[in-house]
Image (cartoon, helix red, strand yellow):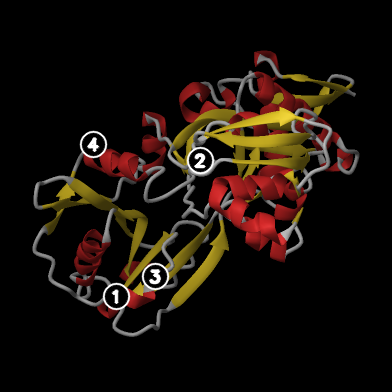
């Protein structure tokens, strides 16, 4: 078996493997790489971040990623989005993905990519490699007439036809009101607002005409977006995305939705905000589903921890267990002085022992040290818990850059 980075000459082999792994019912390799692939199949354009395992020249397993930026605790980090993880069925259970994962993590580390993110087909599969759940979403299916109407005199919702004000809202929210958000590029926005199915764009403005919230609405005809669970699509408004700065903006957007009660019976949307039922006349909805989002993994523990600012000086020893990354799999003296952290490798006995997945959850603010302690995922004294909770307080995480 040969493990290596793919080249442009491997493009068709990679596309064939992806087809066989994820779309076998097509029963053909016809059109696996189209002539205009640079536009219609951009994932095939750059093979420099795709790695594979070859058996006598045949690609049998692959592992791909792309680079982006994620905002965590108001700090920007280079992030790798994992995709294209596939193995031909007759080559599975041989540890090929584990080897490719270890190889790719080393490449990320050498390229100073600090954090990794993925959307799993199976959570337990990636959890054994150090990725763990980093955000959850609440999907609501609500009758539009159930929203409480409250007059808000200093907010107005207007339809817009350009993305500029939506981008401003998103940028101002990232890392502040919401944590663990992707820093969107123009290409990201084009994926989010498909020119072929753009929907309707509405922005909420304050009394100084500053954008402070938005929603992207689609009025469905027949089949709703995959997995949205909309039964009566012709009577439903599907919100592709909704954001607000404050409670007034939230109320103004809900007032806007309520005004559609004679136009559409239901509204379906996803949010990280659990306090939606309090905005309804009665706490009954057609459906309220909590579903997992993405998984995350810290690639370089030292550089990530040292990037944040801290409020309290402290010194302790933390042991990180990371089977795939030897540069993380160490004991460190965690020193905070004048708001800055420094991690120094040490042979001293640890005050805290934690695996890379649970540490990743704590760093991005999805779970606190106390929560990890309750589920036996961190080993430390109870006296250490308030210290760790203060160093890494909980956050409201949002990541929906699907790939």
- How far is disc 3 from disc 1 in space, using C-alphas? 21 Å
Q: Nearer the viewer, mark 1 or mark 4?
A: 4
Disc 1 target residue:
265
Residue occupying the point 24% across, 77% down: 148
- How far is disc 1 from disc 2 in space, using C-alphas? 48 Å
- Is disc 1 placed on a helix, strand or loop? loop
- How far is disc 3 from disc 4 in space, using C-alphas? 28 Å
Disc 2 target residue:
310
- How far is disc 2 from disc 3 in space, using C-alphas? 29 Å
Most foreground residue, 221 or 385: 385
Q: Is residue 317 depicted above or below 103 in this figure?
A: below
Query: Is residue 46 at all visible to an observer of this figure?
Result: yes
Residue occupying the point 90% across, 24% down: 1
Relative to 352, 287 lies left or right: left
Q: Earlier in the sequence, mark 1 or mark 4?
A: 4
Q: Position of residue 108 (x, y in %)?
A: 66, 25
Disc 3 target residue:
275
Q: Is residue 57 depicted above or below 309 in this figure?
A: above
Q: Earlier in the sequence, mark 3 or mark 1?
A: 1
Q: Residues within 10 Å of mark 2 (few under 14, many from 20)?
A: some
């Amino acid at each position: 078996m040969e493990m290596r980075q793919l080249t442009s000459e491997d493009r068709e082999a990679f596309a064939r493997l992806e087809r066989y792994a994820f779309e076998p019912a097509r029963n053909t390799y016809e059109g696996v790489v189209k002539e205009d692939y640079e536009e219609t199949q951009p994932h095939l354009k750059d093979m420099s971040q795709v790695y594979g395992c070859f058996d006598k020249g045949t690609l049998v397993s692959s592992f791909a990623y792309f680079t982006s930026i994620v905002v965590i605790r108001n700090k920007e980090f280079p992030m790798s989005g994992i995709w294209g993880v596939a193995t031909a069925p007759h080559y599975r259970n041989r540890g090929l993905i584990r080897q490719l994962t270890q190889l790719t993590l080393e490449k990320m580390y050498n390229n100073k990519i600090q954090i990794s993110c993925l959307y799993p087909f199976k959570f337990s599969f990636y959890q054994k490699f150090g990725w763990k759940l980093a955000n959850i979403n609440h999907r609501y299916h609500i009758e539009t007439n159930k929203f409480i109407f409250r007059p808000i005199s200093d907010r107005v919702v207007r339809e817009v036809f350009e993305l500029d004000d939506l981008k401003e809202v998103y940028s101002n929210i990232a890392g502040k009101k919401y944590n663990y958000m992707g820093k969107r590029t123009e290409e990201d926005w084009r994926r989010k607002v498909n020119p072929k199915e753009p929907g309707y764009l509405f922005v909420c403005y304050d009394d100084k005409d500053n954008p402070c919230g938005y929603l992207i609405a689609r009025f469905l005809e027949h089949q709703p977006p995959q997995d949205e669970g909309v039964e009566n699509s012709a009577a439903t408004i599907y919100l592709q995305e909704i954001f607000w700065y404050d409670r007034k903006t939230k109320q103004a957007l809900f007032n806007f939705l309520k005004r559609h009660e004679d136009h559409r019976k239901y509204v379906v949307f996803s949010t990280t905000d659990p306090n939606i039922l309090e905005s309804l006349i009665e706490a009954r909805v057609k459906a309220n589903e909590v579903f997992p989002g993405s998984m995350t993994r810290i690639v370089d523990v030292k550089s990530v921890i040292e990037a944040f600012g801290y409020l309290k000086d402290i010194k302790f020893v933390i042991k990180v267990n990371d089977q795939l990354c030897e540069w993380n799999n160490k004991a460190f003296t965690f020193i905070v002085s004048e708001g800055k952290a420094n991690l120094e490798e040490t042979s001293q006995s640890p005050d805290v022992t934690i695996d890379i997945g649970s540490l990743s959850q704590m760093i991005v603010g999805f779970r606190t040290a106390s929560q990890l302690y309750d589920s036996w995922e961190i080993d430390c004294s109870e006296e250490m818990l308030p210290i760790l909770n203060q160093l890494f307080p909980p956050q409201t995480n949002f990541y929906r850059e699907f790939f």
